[in-house]
Image (spheres, rainbow, N blue to C red):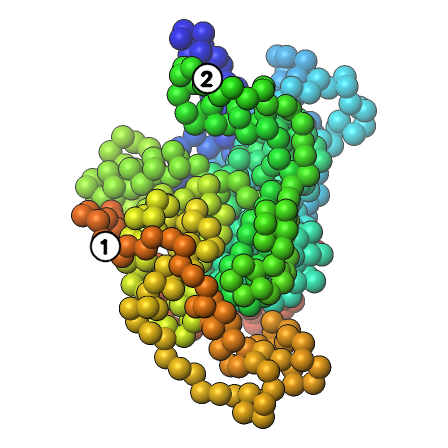
Amino acid sequence: ANGNQEKKETMTSKYVRDDGMVVLDALAASGLRSLRYWKEVPGVRTVVVNDLDPVAIELARENVGRNGFMDDLVEGEGTNDKRIYISNKDKSNVNNSLRPKGIHLQVGDATHEMYLSRLPPSLYPHQCNPTQLHYQKPQYDAIDLDPYGSAAPFLDSAVQAIRNGGLLAVTCTDMAALGGSHPETCYGRYGAMPLQRSGYLQELALRILLYHLSVVAGRYGRTIRPVLSVGMAFYVRVFVEVYDDKAGVNNLSLNHGLVFQSTRCSSFHVTPMASNEFVQHHQRQQNEDVTSPNTNNKSKPRNIYKNGRGPHDLGEPSCRETGAPYKIAGPCWIGPLHDMDIVQRAITRLEAAKDNDDIDPAGGTPRYPLHTATTLHGLLVSVSEELIDVPLYHVLPNVCSAVNTTTIPMTMFRAALANAGYRSSAYHKEPQAVKTDAPNHVVWDIVRAWCKEHPPSQKKESKRHRKGEAPGSTGKNGHMEDDNEEGEACKADVATKILSREIETKVDFTIPEGFGLKKKARRFPVNPEANWGPKKAASGKNKRRLSDDGGDEMEKHNAKSSKHY
């Protein structure tokens, strides 16, 4: 036990710095988030405020003054210093702590800054070309990427510029691509195909981003560990830790998968890109009591990576409910989206602060009252209730609409899943989402049982159907319509097929005592104001003009930086 404790302390100290963290706000714009890092996060030594737009950096300088931090501003050589920061006492390795303490303002390309900050602390200067070494700087402890649009152009440099065990925060606002409206754009940026109009498109967008991040990191022998991954308003944001882990890169295919979505109903399958008996056995041992004797008489699991299997190999070459073919999305990340221990600790801190004038009584965060504390608490509580090992979800109204029935009350639907022996949860972005480990046919069995008690309404025949054409046909060659051209007749045919199947699951809508009790929190907040959403991107032109009295007058500047690509 003492040996394990010593190992744990060693691993912890490997990533904990006693000289403060160095943070890069790579696309800082007005610098407001940079100032929050400096003011609100304990243990921050240096914040580098970077933006390509000189006007943005000038505005950030004004915000530094407005917040009373001019004494912390690093001016002169320290701001655009190109020298390698090497300890004067010990020339043997790079010392990140010698970045001058304070707030650095710099005008520069974010990608270039990160490519020049790739020196790990373990690197010895004599291993590098002296000329190249002169222009290199140490890695950052935390990097924040929040561009107007996609973060894809910045990820290659970011995963190299982050320290081993450092935190990378990434925001993407290109939901038109990630959400499936422009699948060709999404594939070009992230190497994955989304699904347009799928009920789970919000979560799939997160998983596509994490997939791309993990692939980029894997090129350099690094892995990611998601801490928090959320969809908020009109964007997605992920927080991941990045580690040097070449062995973990070998297991990357186990956390990647494909989505097979039925073209005629909401049934879907998520299949991993590969499988490995040894790794899966080891993961089960970690989740169970490792001291219990092994009663399995099977041979020792082999450490061999095998290609994944699609629905055809799982016994469903086509949709079991409708007989329709599948369309494919992905690859995507199918591992955990969050670190639930960290999420729970954040909830505990927020709740403790609520009883102490919105300030953490232990001296940690939040150090100041948060205007969005209630919204943040509701988001984290929703995240903490999610099934961590179940990718994607069903949208209950969509499921019921497929058979023209009334929407089953959420509590009754989830109670039926629980009574059938399956787990379920909500999803933090979609109020009507149901994440469950139940197979598709169990979900539809519950719907079929509901329809027996609440018969679906009869839809009117379409004009084409009245002409004698087969339901679901194009009216020309008798083939099924493309999923983008689905008509009422086709929908009626789908409902008939689904409801005609026999119920195989014992369905019980009885709500168990205490079922569905939740922690009090404000979930799924509404927009703060009417017509709320992303503003126009900064154009980079005419942001300053000379006033009549000879002084500079700042024109209205968008809080978001212009695109850096």
Q: Mark 2 points at which residue?
A: 294
Residue that appears at 34% across and 35% down? 345
Residue at screen point 69% across, 51% down: 191
Quarter the N terminus occupies = top left
Which residue is at 55% across, 52% downward?
A: 269
Q: Nearer the viewer, residue 253 or 423?
A: 423
Say what secondary structure mark 2 lies in: loop
Residue 151 position within the rendered picture, expressed as x and y whole percent measured from the top left: 62, 51
- The residue nearer to you, when weighing 444 against 304, is 444
Whether residue 134 can be seen here: yes
Other-residue count near label 2 (Cα within 10 Å), few / some / many at <14 / 14–19 / ≥20: few
Q: Mark 1 Cα within 10 Å, few/some/many (few <14, many 20+)?
A: few
- Badge 1 is on which residue? 510
Q: What residue type is labelled 1?
A: Thr
Viewer-proximal residue, 124 or 175?
A: 175
Q: Is mark 1 on a helix, strand or loop?
A: loop
Quadrant of the drawing holding the C terminus: bottom right
Q: Which amino acid does label 2 sit on?
A: Asn
Residue 228: x %, y % from top left: 46, 43
Q: Residue at x 54, y 92 (%)?
A: 466
- Could you tell whether 555 is left or right of 192 in the image? left
| Residue 486 relative to residue 395: left or right | right
Left or right of 395 in this view: 506: left
Q: To which quarter of the image does residue 123 belong?
A: top right
Q: How many marks?
A: 2
Q: Picture quarter containing residue 414? A: bottom left
Up-down relation of residue 538 to residue 330 (above or below): below
Q: Which of marks 1 and 2 is nearer the N terminus?
A: 2
